[in-house]
Image (tube, grey):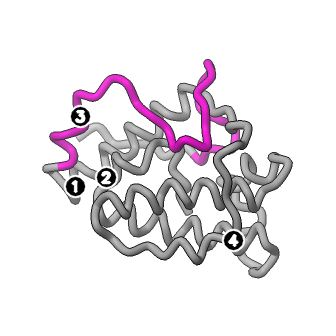
């Protein structure tokens, strides 16, 4: 499960569809409607909010908006609850940079066009449910070692 902190606009089609599916699963987990993934580290930041369902729903809503911009039909009716007046979840700048580098590696292999579009980007936006603060990679991140080929 990867619940990207970075803005969904950076994802290719395959990544955006996978994010939608995985965030819907995360919503189910936070509702207590599944046995799997309950301790998944990606869920910690949502579980630590006052209203985890509101936050994952709002996260999903922004994914839905990106999909709609692209002409995809991700049904907002699947989102249990969302809102625009929420206190944003802080995420460390190092986490955002780590995720963006991870995405670029994926795009290099499966979407060279998207990779070329993003590879020189220096200012990275996050899903609007988050706000960037100073710091390194989040403790919950499962770090992936990358080969230098």
Q: Residue at x 49, y 46 (%)?
A: 144
Q: Quadrant of residue 110?
A: bottom left
Alpha carbon distance from label 4 to label 2: 30 Å
Quarter of the rendering occupied by the N terminus: bottom right
- Report the span colored magenta: 114-142
Dot 4 lies on which element? loop
Mark 4 and mark 1 lie on one chain; the one further toward the N terminus is 4
In the rendered image, residue 140 lying in the magenta stretch gets the answer: yes
Identify residue for label 1.
109
Q: Identify the residue at the far right of this view.
A: 50
Dot 1 lies on which element? helix
Q: Main secondary structure of the magenta part?
A: loop
Left or right, 112 with respect to 104, comes to left
Mark 3 and mark 2 lie on one chain; the one further toward the N terminus is 2
In the rendered image, residue 135 lying in the magenta stretch gets the answer: yes
- Give the foreground label among 4 and 1: 4
Q: Residue 87 placed where, x, y %?
A: 73, 37
Identify residue for label 3.
119
Dot 3 lies on which element? loop
Alpha carbon distance from label 4 to label 3: 35 Å
Mark 4 and mark 3 lie on one chain; the one further toward the N terminus is 4
Q: Residue at x 40, y 38 (%)?
A: 100
Q: Residue 52 placed where, x, y %?
A: 78, 56
Mark 3 and mark 1 lie on one chain; the one further toward the N terminus is 1
- Give the foreground label among 3 and 1: 3
Q: Residue 88 placed where, x, y %?
A: 68, 37
Alpha carbon distance from label 3 to label 1: 13 Å
- Give the foreground label among 4 and 3: 4
Alpha carbon distance from label 2 to label 1: 6 Å
Identify residue for label 4.
80
Identify the mark at residue 106; answer none if there is no mark. Answer: 2
């Amino acid at each position: 499960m990867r619940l990207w902190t970075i803005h969904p606009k950076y994802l290719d089609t395959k990544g955006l569809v996978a994010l939608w599916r995985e965030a819907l699963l995360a919503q189910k987990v936070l509702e207590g409607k599944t046995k799997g993934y309950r301790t998944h580290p990606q869920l910690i930041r949502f579980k630590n909010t006052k209203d985890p369902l509101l936050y994952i729903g709002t996260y999903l809503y922004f994914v839905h908006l990106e999909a709609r911009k692209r002409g995809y039909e991700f049904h907002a009716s699947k989102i249990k609850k969302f809102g625009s007046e929420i206190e944003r979840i802080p995420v460390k700048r190092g986490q955002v940079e780590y995720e963006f580098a991870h995405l670029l590696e994926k795009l290099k292999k499966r979407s060279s066009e998207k990779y070329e579009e993003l590879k020189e980007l220096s200012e990275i936006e996050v899903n609007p449910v988050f706000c960037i603060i100073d710091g390194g990679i989040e403790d919950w991140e499962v770090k992936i070692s990358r080969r230098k080929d």
